[in-house]
Image (tube, rainbow, N blue to C red):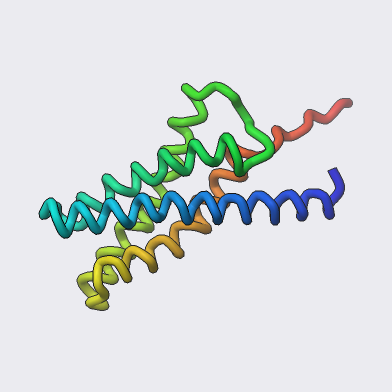
């Protein structure tokens, strides 16, 4: 694959991932708002729960719409790997939300928006490189 074709594919996939991430963020943030405002949940517990829900939606969109390549089609390997990589994003999410709410005194939803921006790049890069890229070609000797 030529460099230009690789770059074009990266741009298309990153655009698709952004769209899918916006949908997942809508689910995540909407659920976060509901659980904290109407159910009285602690904001960090709610943020963890809703991040996972958004992650499931993002996984479904990633395998059906976003990425052109998959390292494996075994869901028993791919889904747990996707979730495990999402833990890096979850850590970023929780750190930024807690810092935003407690140190900077942002509203929960503003802190969530900052966290989403911070975790987006981490999750896209890890998932694309480790799960949704063509396997390296073996070299023949």
> Considering depth in this image, is 120 or 138 the residue closer to the camera?
120
Query: Residue 47, position in %: x, y?
Result: 27, 53
Query: Residue 113, position in %: x, y?
Result: 38, 66
Q: Residue at point 28% right, 51% down?
A: 31
- Relative horizontal placement of residue 85, taking residue 111 as reference (left or right): right
Q: Residue at point 26% right, 78% down?
A: 104
Query: Residue 79, position in %: x, y?
Result: 46, 31
- Most distant residue in the bottom direction: 104
- Relative horizontal placement of residue 96, taking residue 23 as reference (left or right): left
Instruction: Pick the quarter of the image with the C terminus.
Output: top right
Query: Looking at the picture, does residue 88 appear above or below residue 97?
Result: above
Instruction: Pick the quarter of the image with the N terminus.
Output: top right
> Considering depth in this image, is 141 or 66 the residue closer to the camera?
66
Query: Looking at the picture, does residue 67 appear above or below residue 73?
Result: below
Query: Residue 39, position in %: x, y?
Result: 12, 51
- Relative horizontal placement of residue 44, taking residue 15 as reference (left or right): left
Q: Residue at point 54% right, 47% down?
A: 126
> Considering depth in this image, is 85 or 64 the residue closer to the camera?
64
Number of marks drawn: 0
Q: Quadrant of residue 111?
A: bottom left
Query: Looking at the picture, does residue 112 appear above or below residue 3?
Result: below
Q: Residue at point 34% right, 51% down?
A: 28
- Relative horizontal placement of residue 103, taking residue 81 as reference (left or right): left
Q: Quadrant of residue 25?
A: bottom left
- Most distant residue in the left direction: 40
């Amino acid at each position: 694959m030529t460099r230009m074709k690789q770059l074009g594919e990266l741009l298309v996939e990153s655009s698709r991932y952004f769209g899918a991430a916006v949908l997942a963020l809508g689910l995540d943030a909407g659920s976060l708002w509901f659980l904290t405002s109407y159910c009285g949940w602690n904001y960090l517990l709610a943020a963890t729960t809703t991040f996972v829900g958004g992650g499931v939606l993002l996984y479904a969109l990633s395998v059906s719409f976003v990425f052109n390549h998959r390292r494996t089609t075994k869901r028993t390997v791919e889904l747990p790997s996707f979730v495990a990589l999402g833990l890096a994003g979850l850590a970023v999410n929780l750190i930024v939300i807690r810092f935003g709410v407690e140190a900077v005194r942002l509203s929960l939803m503003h802190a969530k928006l900052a966290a989403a921006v911070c975790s987006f790049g981490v999750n896209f890069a890890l998932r694309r490189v480790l799960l949704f890229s063509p396997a390296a070609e073996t070299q023949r000797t």
